[in-house]
Amino acid sequence: MRSTFHSIETAKRSLFTEQALINTTGHNIANANTPGYSRQRVNLVATRPIEAPGMMRSNIPGQLGTGVEFTSITRIREQFLDDQFRNANRSLGEATIQADTLSKLETIFNEPSDAGIRTVMDNFWKSWTDLAKDPESITGRKIVRENALALVDAFNETSKHLNDLSADLTTSIEAKANKMNSLTEAIASLNFEIRKLEAYGDNPNDLRDQRDYLVDQLSRIVNVNVVDGPDGYTITTGGFPLVEGENSNPVTGPALVVEYGGEVAGLITSRDKYVADYQEQLNAMVDTLVNGDINITIPKGSTYLGAKLAADLPVTVKGLNGLHKLGYLFNTPPAVPVLAGDFFVSTGGPFTAESIRLNPTIANDPMQIATSMRTEMINGSNETVKGNNTLANIMAGLKETSFKFTPTTTGNGIAEGTIDAFYASMLGQLGVQSESATRLAANQQDIVTQVDSRRQSVSGVSLDEEMSELIKYQHAYSAAARFMTTVDETLDKIINGMGLVGR
């Protein structure tokens, strides 16, 4: 049997439901620019009609509806697009870090430029050519010394910048570990809050959005695998569990590995592959310049191992130092001619771009630079021939001389060639790597933008759509209110206007 006040209940449910729709739409509009927010929708269902099929029912045809109610407020989210975005975001993080590091390496080497190693080396070889024209010139020797100091400074400074970059990358790895720990702790805390609210039957949409936004940020740092279980998100990376329900497992910088992916992998690869490789190649170039095997020809008439050569003599010497030690310094009779010493020295251990120094003896006295390879008996004493420029000529020719380079562990760089060719191959490799990394980062950015646009088309708030929905809900609310007024007027007529006949 119908209730007299049935329609009032129907109108009330309609008002409450339309009010929930309006409030939810307002919530969407308010968060249109909130990062990570997913638009929410009210799920409606018709309430159970008055009479269900049964043995005890009236003969009134059909079932009289009782209105509407909302069963839940849910967010619009697609897990597949989330997974796509996080995978693309991880690749973008890795590619961006590598492109940035290679760009910094290009800045460190600063080629071509007037202050780069190539220009400083050219000036060094040119100063030997000029000295060969006037081998007795003290000014020429001072110019060689100054250019040698400039070359050493260029090597030292470049090595320092490479070491600083490597240290910065290590510091960044530590910073990323701390950021990971902060994110995973927040995710674990949200897991607890969400699980607690869901136990009461609530649907914590906003907390879920916050958790997913944190996972999105984490996905740029490392490659995340997310599983949604009864205790919340379980997140792993490289087999390591970062989050397990309401518990998070902190990591430290040294524990991070390339397999973690994302910016972490980009930082580790940049430090251990790119920076380390160019440090090693630069060190190999310096070591080869000072000590590498080179084949030269000592012209006849020169003094070699205390004897005058009757013919040209091909020999193999150990780099610039080995060649310089074949020259003779100017001596004061009747002293015996003195062979020159090492041109470069190391501050300790093998020659590297960091350890190479100009021999302090030469730095303090440019006359310790040898130019002559010939001695003669003059007035009964053996003296260095001052006008001889054999050594200076051979030194100047080292610019075009082929060296056998110290092998690198990566196999990069040429095995044999001129110093300039080795340096050019190193810069060419850097240029190709940087261009490739920049292109990869740009392509990956396009992929992330595309995937995020698809995700926003599903989860994002469209103000135009929300406004049209708001107008619809407003009209529905007004209609429900009008329905309530109509029922009220009808009841007033029934209660106060009926049964008055005969008065």
Image (cartoon, grey):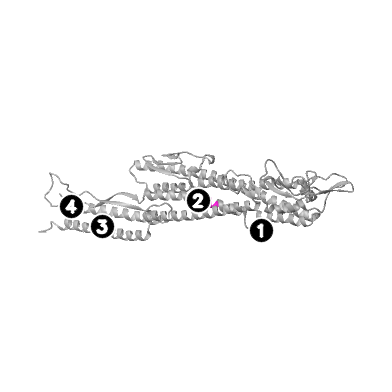
Q: Which residues are magenta?
A: 93-100
Between marks 4 and 2, how big is the CA–CA gap?
Answer: 63 Å
Residue 135 shows in the view: yes
Q: Are marks 3 and 1 in contact (CB under 8 Å)?
A: no
Of labels 4 and 2, earlier in sequence is: 4
Q: Main secondary structure of the magenta part?
A: helix
**Residue at 35% of width from left, 58% of height from top?**
466
Is residue 269 a member of the stretch shown in magenta?
no
Between marks 1 and 2, how big is the CA–CA gap?
Answer: 31 Å
Q: Which residue is mark 3?
A: 480
Q: Which mark is residue 64?
A: 4
- Identify which amino acid the numbered label 1 is placed on: Asp
How many other residues sit within 10 Å of disc 4, few (<14), some (14-19) or many (≥20)?
Answer: some
Of labels 3 and 4, earlier in sequence is: 4
Which element is circle 3 on?
A: helix
Which element is circle 4 on?
A: loop
Q: Which residue is mark 1?
A: 114
- Identify which amino acid the numbered label 3 is placed on: Ala
* Residue 105 percent coordinates (x, y): 59, 52
- Identify which amino acid the numbered label 4 is placed on: Leu
Q: Are marks 1 and 4 in contact (CB under 8 Å)?
A: no
Q: Tell which tag, 4 or 2, sits nearer the viewer.
A: 2
Of labels 1 and 2, earlier in sequence is: 2
Of labels 3 and 1, earlier in sequence is: 1
Q: Tell which tag, 3 or 4, sits nearer the viewer.
A: 4
* Residue 381 percent coordinates (x, y): 87, 46
Q: Are marks 1 and 2 in contact (CB under 8 Å)?
A: no
* Residue 231 percent coordinates (x, y): 38, 39
